[in-house]
Amino acid sequence: MSPLGFAVAAALGNVAGALAVVRHLRQGLKLIDGCLAFGAGFMLAVTILDVVPEVAGSSPAALLFVLLGYFAVHLAQHVFTSHFHFGEETHRLSASAGFSALLGLTLHTFFDGVAIASGFLVSDRLGLLLFLAVLLHKLPEGVTIASVIVAGGQSRGRAVGGAAVLGVATILGVLLTEQLAPLARHGLALSAGVTLYVAASNLVPEFQGKRGWLTPLAFFGGGLGYFVTERLLAGLIQS
């Protein structure tokens, strides 16, 4: 299977999320909000049950790269970025906020691509699981960057363009993982830390304060969805 094709599909998710913002598709945004919680549960399950054991099995020292990936995302999104949170931005922001958010998300989306490519280097099953984990948060990611750019007074075209930049970063992550030996060797560990941060420190705080049962059910459903998907893939793919 070609990781590049899956990276392109994931990148289109960024653009689809941005289009939901600029076209004011309220029903689409509600659906994407549910994807945020479901994706968090799925991503946590994949990372903890598949990726971290794979990384630890290769070398105990590789776990240091997991921690490095986690710290790197926090540095990019919450130290060097003036304003950032996942989901639709509803408050007026400065124009610079959109630019800094784009820079912060670009590192994360680059490692989305690294995660997909690194997963396929291990097995088709892990590559597909990581692709699905990435895809599920691509829509909220597109919503995030587009709404921040629009809230900063920029045009809708720039908002969609910002989402496209994130998609290109994902594709670049796949291409460089296939070309650079250090990324091929440590990319899975680094992307594990990145994915763990996005799921637990970005996505979960966005919905854990909301009332009602819908969001918690979507979150737990994401974890259950992992087990169902993993069993289906185990039956279909032997590698």
Image: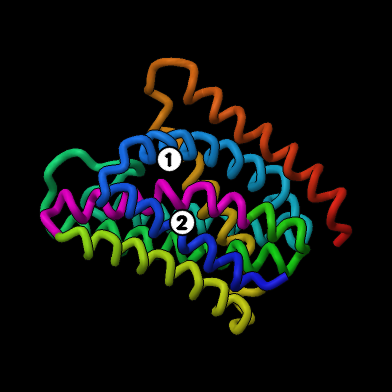
N-terminal of the two: label 1 or label 2? 2
- Report the residue marked by disc 1: 32
Position of the C terminus, as image quadrant, is: bottom right
The residue that appears at 51% across and 23% down in the rendered structure is: 216
Q: Is residue 131 left or right of residue 208?
A: right
Q: Position of residue 4 (x, y in %)?
A: 59, 73
24 lies above or below 178: above
Q: Residue at x 53, y 47 (%)?
A: 136
Residue 54 versus residue 220 in the image, above or below:
below
- Of 140 and 109, the residue lying toward us: 140
Label 2 Cα neighbours within 10 Å, binned few <14 / some 14-19 / many ≥20: many
Task: From the viewer's side, name the closer residue of 229 and 51.
Answer: 229
Position above or below: 4 against 125 = below
Q: Between residues 7 and 156, which one lies in front from this camera angle? A: 156
- Residue 32: horizontal and vertical position, in percent? 43, 40
Residue 236's disc number: none
Task: Look at the numbered disc 1 and give the secondary structure of its residue.
Answer: helix
- Asked if residue 137 lies in the magenta stretch, the reply is yes
Which kind of residue does numbered mark 2 sit on? Gly
Q: Secondary structure at mark 2?
A: helix
Tally the numbered discs. Answer: 2
What residue type is disc 1 on?
Answer: Ile
Q: Main secondary structure of the magenta part?
A: helix
Question: Could you say which quadrant of the image residue 56 lies in?
Answer: bottom right
Residue in the image at 23% along x and 48% along y: 83
Q: Residue at x 46, y 56 (%)?
A: 13
217 vs 117: above or below: above
Residue at which label 2 appears: 13
Quadrant in which the N terminus is drawn: bottom right
Per the rendered image, the range of residues in magenta is 131-154
